[in-house]
């Protein structure tokens, strides 16, 4: 099974889907303890389903507000915030202090330090520069580069 973070899924459903002998409460406690160990702050107390490999990409001080999805190999740096209804693709980097809210970032994206993306869809290999702000809903094609300090 690929490693992934899925915040906001029902733990009972996760336990049943994995055919795991543990009940939902045991799984929830296990995953919350693992997250605390890695120092990430996850704001979804009702239900969390985490695969352990991705927690290595959540740095101390990163915040994840579910429901959202963070794929295998993604890196969420210190101070970065992922808000509800966001999808972070495989091997995507969300740098220090960056904010992703209600957006989809396809694989291999890079959201620069202090950058902010709201309600947008970013294609593969998109680069959002330092302190860039995308406030309006936007769809950016593959390999698009938003330069540092740009505002949309």
Image (cartoon, rainbow, N blue to C red):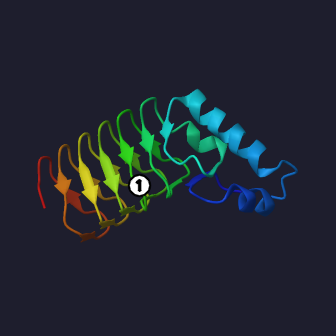
127 to 93, vertically: above or below? below
Left or right, residue 112 beside residue 4: left
The residue that label 1 is drawn on is: 108
Q: Residue at x 50, y 58 (%)?
A: 67
Q: Which image quadrant for residue 84?
A: bottom left
Q: Position of residue 79 (x, y in %)?
A: 35, 35
- Badge 1 local density, few (<14 within 10 Å), some, or many (20+)? some
The residue under the point 57% across, 46% down is 45
Instruction: Write the residue at 24% across / 51% down.
Output: 116
For this rendering, which residue is in front, 80 or 83?
83
> Which quarter shows the C terminus?
bottom left
Quadrant containing the N terminus in the rendered view:
bottom right
> Which residue appears farthest toward the front when viewing the image?
46
Query: Where residue 54 appears, x then y in whole percent?
Result: 57, 44
- Where residue 107 sits: x, y (%)? 44, 59
The number of discs equals 1
Q: Is residue 19 above or below residue 55?
A: below
In the image, residue 31 sits, relative to residue 36, either above or below, namely: below
Q: Which secondary structure, mark 1?
A: loop
Closer to the camera in the image, 15 or 128: 15
Front position in the image: 72 or 118: 118
Q: Is residue 11 left or right of residue 105?
A: right
**Residue drawn 42% across and 59% down?**
86
């Amino acid at each position: 099974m690929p490693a992934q973070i899925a915040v906001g899924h029902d733990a009972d459903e996760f336990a049943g889907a994995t055919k795991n002998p543990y009940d939902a409460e045991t799984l929830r406690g296990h995953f919350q303890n693992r997250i605390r160990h890695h120092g990430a702050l996850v704001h979804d107390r009702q239900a969390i389903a985490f695969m352990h490999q991705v927690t290595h990409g959540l740095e101390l001080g990163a915040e994840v507000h579910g429901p959202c999805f963070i794929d295998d190999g993604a890196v969420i740096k210190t101070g970065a915030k992922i808000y509800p209804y966001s999808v972070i693709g495989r091997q995507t980097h969300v740098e220090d202090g960056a904010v992703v809210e209600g957006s989809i970032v396809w694989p291999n994206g890079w959201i620069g330090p202090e950058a902010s993306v709201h309600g947008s869809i970013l294609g593969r290999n998109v680069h959002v520069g330092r302190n860039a702000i995308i406030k309006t809903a936007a769809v950016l094609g593959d390999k698009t580069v938003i330069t540092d300090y740009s505002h949309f």
